[in-house]
Image: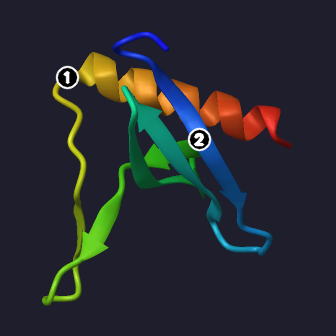
Amino acid sequence: MEENAISVSRIYRVESDSKLKAFIDLSLSGIVVKGFSVVNGSKGLFVNMPRQQGKDGKWYNTVYPATKELKQQLSDLVLEAYKAAE
């Protein structure tokens, strides 16, 4: 495996009429990051970073890509895997 390899380790499709379509786990250089989600929004499919609900009831991201390019790369990878699994 490459040192900086990023791959999809699991796809869990949500079978319902909600906007949430799937949860995705990614493997980043041997570390699994759980909780990416694919959502069908008003402008089409997009990827949410893993997040957790705070005591105030609001949701907060728990993973922050260091650059816009990395965020785009992660989003592209997740959406490609989601569409390939259809």
Percent position of residue 3, x then y: 35, 13
Q: Nearer the viewer, mark 2 or mark 1?
A: 2
Label whose residue precedes the other's in the sequence (2 or 1): 2
- Which residue is under mark 1? 67
- Which residue is under mark 2? 9
- Rendered residue at 39%/48% (across/down): 33
Q: Outermost residue, top direction?
A: 2
Residue 54 vertical placement versus 25 (above, below) = below
Q: Badge 1: how crowded within 10 Å, few (<14), some, or many (20+)?
A: few
Looking at the rendered image, the quarter that the C terminus falls into is: top right
Which is nearer the eye, 72 or 52? 52
- Amino acid on which disc 2 is placed: Ser
Which quarter of the figure has residue 59?
bottom left
- Rendered residue at 36%/56% (across/down): 50
Which is nearer the eye, 42 or 54? 54
Q: Is residue 47 visible?
A: yes
